[in-house]
Amino acid sequence: MIKNRCRFAVRVIITSMFFSLFLYANALLASDDETEAFKTVPLNILEDQEVCLKEFGVTVNLPKNNRITGTVRLHGKESPLRGIDIVYTDINGFEHTLKTNRDGRFTLFNIAHPYTVRALEKDYILRSASLDMEEGDSIVHLNLVMNKRANVFAMIFSVIGGLGIFLLGMRYMSEGLQTVSGPTLKRLISLITNNRFLAITVGVCVTTFVQSSSITTVMAVGFVNSGIMALHQAIGVIMGANVGTTITGWILVLDIGKWGLPIIGLFAFLYLFSRNEKVKYIAFTLMGVGMVFFGLELMKDGFKPIRLLPEFEAMFSMVHATSYFNVLLIALIGCLLTMIVQSSSATLGITIGLAQTGVIGFETAAALVLGENIGTTITAMFASIGTSTNAKRAAYFHTLFNLTGVLWITALFQLYLPMIRSIVGHDPNTMVLKNGNETYPYITAGIASVHTVFNIVNVILFIPFTRKIASLLTKVVKESKVKTAMVTKLQQSLLTSPFAAVQQTKYEVIKMEQVTRGMMNTLRAIINGEKKSQSTINIIFRDEEKLDIMQSEITEFLTDLMSEPLPMEIAEECKEHLRMSDELESVSDYITQILKLLLRLEDNDTKLSDEQVANIIKLHDEVKNFFNLVRDCEKNQTIQADYDKICAASDDLTALIRTYRNDHWEKASMTKMLPLVNTAYTDILQSYRKIKNHMLNSVEVQAL
């Protein structure tokens, strides 16, 4: 609850800042539209026959026939504009209005002083004018170049829609890759050792597979919280995640934006009609790739009109990365934007969209990318709320790592960018006309290089100090004395990664097994009379209550996870963990039931015979051996191979219990026995049989 409130508060504050900026810009545009609906081109005759171009106008000596021809075309394209209203006044004082023809041409006759020509069109605005004059000044040709008038709301809707499709594509791509590469991810996580280089490699590979450094970092924080991973191991994974996330930029370097929609359509059909689950999720992944590129194209189309708005142009020019202060300011903007969308890949896409349309230059884009590295740490910080102190230390390292890196790289910013230019081989700001449109073919590679080189160099600088940083964080961030309400270490933030969620649930089930094993050992000591103090008895009752809570929390967590669409393999694992947690909780109930029966005998000043106690101890040891056999087979993943062996051991236990029960009834018929002893002994035998049955049930869940 606290985590959700913090996330909501941060988003509200930052969104309010950007919304206020949008309202201010829109107000400026509204006032501009009210006062100036069109541009005027004055034509003045000079005695020296000099042609002079003025702002929004052209000065020229008219030919003797007072005729001017002209052409209107759209800036950046060769195609003319048809149907543009041209207004002028003739020598008799009559105002004339004519429209450009299909070639965008018009002709003005008997034009009068003050020789003004107006181009009226609500959807276009005059950009520039030039004259073509033939020899002898017999013909004057006026070229008018128009820009499409920017529609702020259309621009905002295009950007928001594109961003939404981009984010959804990233999610589809991430979920598809996690599903397809699930076994590989499991092997990668198991490879993490004390070797920092291996941990970094795992971080790079996992992030490449899930296409999100936030998911990898949250996963690392969650694994530290549950004890699966040590702090210094998580530090290596987090550093690797920062390098792995740069692959997104290189994917966007591919100039296949126009193919985004066909890719979506093609693989959507494959996803819908394929019956092979692996093929379906490969198609699902490629649908995500298509959505990423299609969303980027929509964002680029939305950003293009920004160049036509002087207010936005002035605003961007104010934060040009020309000084250290401006670089920090731009980095702060990138940081805040990433905090809003909580995805550095999404803000990287926005940055590339702005740069590819020429709205911002390479220097500004580079500074934004650096800030985005800081903004992405907010996800791990949110994920660490309510977790263990060690998990908080991992989240703090993520922030420290990125913040330190940005501080030193911004200090060397003016030296860093020339190095990037040499790596790219071209100036990323180079503009190339393609089909009449301005393009920046090298700027995406430049931005991707800035992101990649920064993170690689930062990792190289931090590698020698990973253990020292872990020790420093341990000293600085003290252990919290506040106990969390939850018994398990399951985090709702891990639900974004089904693979990680299932892995952590598996670890919690293993902890339930360990607690159950401890209860078995304690119960034997009580039966044997070795430890029969009240504190020892309380341990069993306390552990039984703990297992009840753990089973409840695991069930709630997995229910939330299974409410989302899951691949068959992960869904089956969820069901398996649900069943195993339920079986283990039932085992703890019967262990407690045996203890209650023994205490009941003691409260009534009676006890079992020495032979009965010996039988129970022997049966207890056999059930415990069966428990260990099952757990060893699970650990070694040999359940299916050893299933017959486990069933044979179960049958032997059943036969032993039946033998003890038959012997008991035979003796009860021959000698007098207290009713309480009679029922207690048979109930204890039955409880051990139930324990064995529940353990066998957990085997069948995995084997069948």
Image (spheres, grey):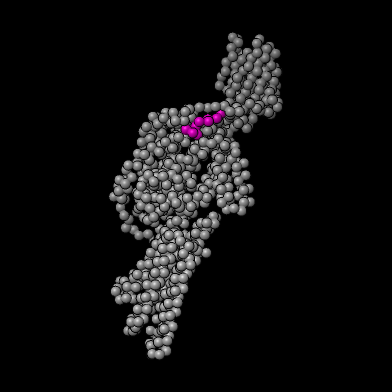
Q: Which stretch did the figure color magenta?
A: 438-446
Q: Is residue 443 magenta?
A: yes
Residue 674: x %, y % from top left: 38, 87
Say which residue appears at 31% left-offset and 50% top-offset: 474
Total numbered labels: 0
Q: Is residue 636 above or below residue 593?
A: above
Residue 696: x %, y % from top left: 47, 69
Instruction: Tell me the quarter of the picture where residue 688 sits.
Output: bottom left
Say which residue appears at 58% left-offset and 12% top-offset: 50
Say which residue appears at 50% left-offset and 31% top-offset: 442
Q: Is residue 256 above or below residue 2?
A: above
Q: Is residue 86 left or right of residue 287?
A: right
Residue 667 in view: yes
- Please name whichever residue, 255 or 401, is drawn nearer the observer in this view of the structure: 255
- Please name whichever residue, 75 or 117, is drawn nearer the observer in this view of the structure: 75
- Please name whichever residue, 517 or 171, is drawn nearer the observer in this view of the structure: 517
Residue 199: x %, y % from top left: 39, 47
- Please name whichever residue, 21 or 587, is drawn nearer the observer in this view of the structure: 587
Q: Is residue 237 magenta?
A: no
Residue 432: x %, y % from top left: 54, 27
